Amino acid sequence: MTFDPASFVFSQPSEPTAIRASSVLPARRENVELRTEDGHVLVGELALPESGEVKATLITLHPLPTHGGFMDSHVYRKASYRLPALAGIAVLRFNTRGTASPRGTSGGAFEEGVGERLDVEAAVDFAVQRGLPNRWLVGWSFGTELALMYGASEPVASAIEGAILLSPPLHRATEAHLLAWAASGKPLKVLVPEHDDYLQPDAAAERFSVVPQARVVGVDGAKHLWVGEKHAGRVLNEIVDEVLSGGTGAALPQEWDGPVASATV
C-alpha cells in the first residue's frame, strides 16, 4: 500500500514542544510521479510550505539503494518534516530507478549511476515545471556521485543554483566531474563526517581543491550515515544556511509552537 502523506494526524499542544526525530510539522505534502526520458516512472513526494513564499527548493538524491538508501533515508525525511515550516523551503524526495520505499517502487532497475542521469534530469525538470524557485541539488553518499556527475552539465546546470554534498565517497565521480564543477562556478558545499567510512575531511579537502568555490566542512564526531539527532540537525542547519541567500548562520528552532504530528514510518 502506498504511503499517503495526508494520513499524518496533527494536534495542537498547549505549549511549545521540542522538535524530535519523529516530529512532523505542517506542510502541503503530495505524492508525485517523475517521468524519465527513457520511459520510467519514479515515485516521490513534494513537501511545500503551508503558506507564504517558497524561498528555496531542495532536490534530494538518496544514498545507494543496494545498501538501503531510498527517499526516506532519515536526513531527507527530517528535511521534509521540518524545513517547509521552519524555513519556507520546498523538499522534493524521490526513489531513483528500481528503488522501493513506503511511498512505492520506481520503475526500471538500478544502473550503477549511469541510467540515473535521466532520473536527476527528470527531478530537476519537475521542479522547473512546477515553478519552484532557487533550486539546489542535495546529494548524500551515492546521491553525491549523481550530483557531481550530472549537476554541472546541461540540461541540469542552468536549472540549479548549486549543490550540497553529504558524505561524498568520490567512487564514481572523477576529477573530470570536479573540474566541470570548477568551470561552472556554481557553489558546492561539502559536509564530511570526521569518522566517514570512505572519505574523511583532510582527504576530502585535497580532492575538492580543484574546485575553487567548493567549501569543505568537516563535522566532528559524525559518521557516514549522520546517525543521531545532533548530527542530522547540524546537516539541516548547514543546508538552510547555504540555500537561503544572506544566511546568518542562525540555528533552526528546536521547539515548535503550533500543530504537530508524529511519524510512524
Image (tube, rainbow, N blue to C red):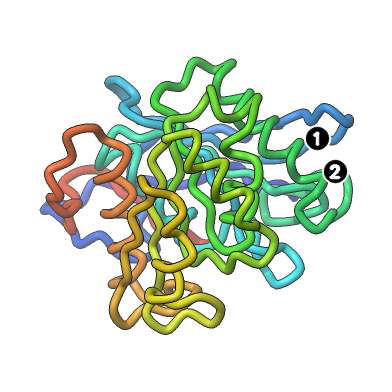
Mark 1, Cα crowd under 10 Å, few <14 / some 14-19 / many 20+, is: many
Q: Is residue 91 visible?
A: no
* Residue with the mark numbered 1: 41
Name the spot of residue 193 as percent of width and height, x first: 40, 74
Query: In the picture, residue 232 is in which quadrant?
Result: bottom left
Mark 2, Cα crowd under 10 Å, few <14 / some 14-19 / many 20+, is: some
At a point 30% along the width and 65% down the height, the residue shown is: 20
Q: Amino acid at mark 1?
A: Val
**Is 104 placed above or below 155 here?**
below
Marks 1 and 2, Cα distance to the nearest angstrom?
Answer: 5 Å
Q: Amino acid at mark 2?
A: Gly
Query: In the picture, residue 205 is in which quadrant?
Result: bottom left
Name the spot of residue 121 as percent of width and height, x first: 68, 32
- Closer to the camera in the image, 58 or 211: 211
Q: Is residue 47 visible?
A: yes
Query: In the picture, residue 233 is in which quadrant?
Result: bottom left
Q: Is residue 236 left or right of residue 45?
A: left
Judged from the image, the secondary structure of the residue bearing numbered disc 1 is: strand
Name the spot of residue 49 as percent of width and height, x first: 35, 30
**Is 6 placed above or below 125 here?**
below
Q: Is residue 163 left or right of residue 253?
A: right
First in sequence: mark 1 vs mark 2: 1
Name the spot of residue 257 as percent of width and height, x first: 15, 46
